[in-house]
């Protein structure tokens, strides 16, 4: 019998009834700019001022990243917005600011400002209130220049996390490339093992990610929303670039919410409900990835109960 994602969720996905309150997750099976914008407008009432769009822009020529034309049409609807990123801990195409800028050009992220928030290795330490392990996380210093954040995520698998949803996008992605990401991965920033197989994994890693994501969520308060695009769901993250495994399941759709736990929970449930999701489920379970969800629930980061509202 297949293990199910631990959910008390929407009867629309799981057939399970719930009691009490439920977060709203808006969903469409149609993956295009029109529907992305339509769903965003259902959750954007508290997005104002200078807006950060946190996007994983990917390694060079990554085949699975969110399509540039879709992201461009979306960004054009949001005044005073910029894509935001940080450099990486691993020595890939985005390890240095210079290499990162070149990768952005190669991948076509040239239609709007892209703010590498730690471009000069500058950090801002955000507190982690009631975290599992961390008291603070070093974020890219420019993070605090923004009034609001839109977390625009390619939902897919992840080599260490099992899956990468909204929580992974900000938990790792907003942390500064060297100091912050070392904290989130549980390694010594002055002695990072070259072999990431030596980095901490499983429950401890999921809890570190949750701590970091909580710091960002607490900082922005009501002024942060979450969008998960469930297309080309490889078992590998966009960090793998052209080496990512080819997806073995069909695209599912777009899910959005003001609740980070609800949107990641809903996406996991949609994966578990899909007949062709064996490989992604195996990746999630082998890495204890569902601990991402229970960790967020334990720290009150959102509601695991949700209503999935499908939009045509």
Image: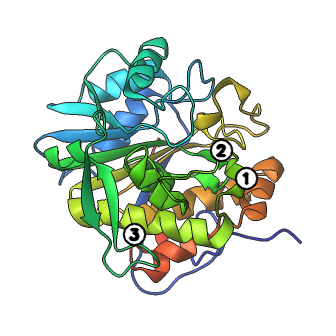
Query: Badge 2: few (under 14), some or many (20 or more) residues near its Cα, within 10 Å?
Result: few
| Tag 1 residue | 197
In three-dimensional space, the C-alpha distance between marks 3 and 2, rounded to whole angstroms, equals 41 Å
Distance between mark 3 and mark 1 Cα atoms:
37 Å
Q: Residue at x 84, y 68 (%)?
A: 2
Label 3 with label 2: CB-CB less than 8 Å: no
Image spot of residue 173 (x, y percent): 43, 46
Q: Nearer the viewer, residue 19 or 227?
A: 227
Label 3 secondary element? strand
Label 1 neighbourhood size at 10 Å, few (<14), some (14-19), many (20+)?
A: few
Q: Nearer the viewer, residue 164 or 253?
A: 164
Q: Which mark is residue 150?
A: none
Which residue was labeled with disc 3? Answer: 23
Please state the horizontal and vertical placement of residue 62, each as a whole percent of the image: 60, 24
Q: Is residue 18 left or right of residue 100?
A: right
Count of marks, rendered view = 3
């Amino acid at each position: 019998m297949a293990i199910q994602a631990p959910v008390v969720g929407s009867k629309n996905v799981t057939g399970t009834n719930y009691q009490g309150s439920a977060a709203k997750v808006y969903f469409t099976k149609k993956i295009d700019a029109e529907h992305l914008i339509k769903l965003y407008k259902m959750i954007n009432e508290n997005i104002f001022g200078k807006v950060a769009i946190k996007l994983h822009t990917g390694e060079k020529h990554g085949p699975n990243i969110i399509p540039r034309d879709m992201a461009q049409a979306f960004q054009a609807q949001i005044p005073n917005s910029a894509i935001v990123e940080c450099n990486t801990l691993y020595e890939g195409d985005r390890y240095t600011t210079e290499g990162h800028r070149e990768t952005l050009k190669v991948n076509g992220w040239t239609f709007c400002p892209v703010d590498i928030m730690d471009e000069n290795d500058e950090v801002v330490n955000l507190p982690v209130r009631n975290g599992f392990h961390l008291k603070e996380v070093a974020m890219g210093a420019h993070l605090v220049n923004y009034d609001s954040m839109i977390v625009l995520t390619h939902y897919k698998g992840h080599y260490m996390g099992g899956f990468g949803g909204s929580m992974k996008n900000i938990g790792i992605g907003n942390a500064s490339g060297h100091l912050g990401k070392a904290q989130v991965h549980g390694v010594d920033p002055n002695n990072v093992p070259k072999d990431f197989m030596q980095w901490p994994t499983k429950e401890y890693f999921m809890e570190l990610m949750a701590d970091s994501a909580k710091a960002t969520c607490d900082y922005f308060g009501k002024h942060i929303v979450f969008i998960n695009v469930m297309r080309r769901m490889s078992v590998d993250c966009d960090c793998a670039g052209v080496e990512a495994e080819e997806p073995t399941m069909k695209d599912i759709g777009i899910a959005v919410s003001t609740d980070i736990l609800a949107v990641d929970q809903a996406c996991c449930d949609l994966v578990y409900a899909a007949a062709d999701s064996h490989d992604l489920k195996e990746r999630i379970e082998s890495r204890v990835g569902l601990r991402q969800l229970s960790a967020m629930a334990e720290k009150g980061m959102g509601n695991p109960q949700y209503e999935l509202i499908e939009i045509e």
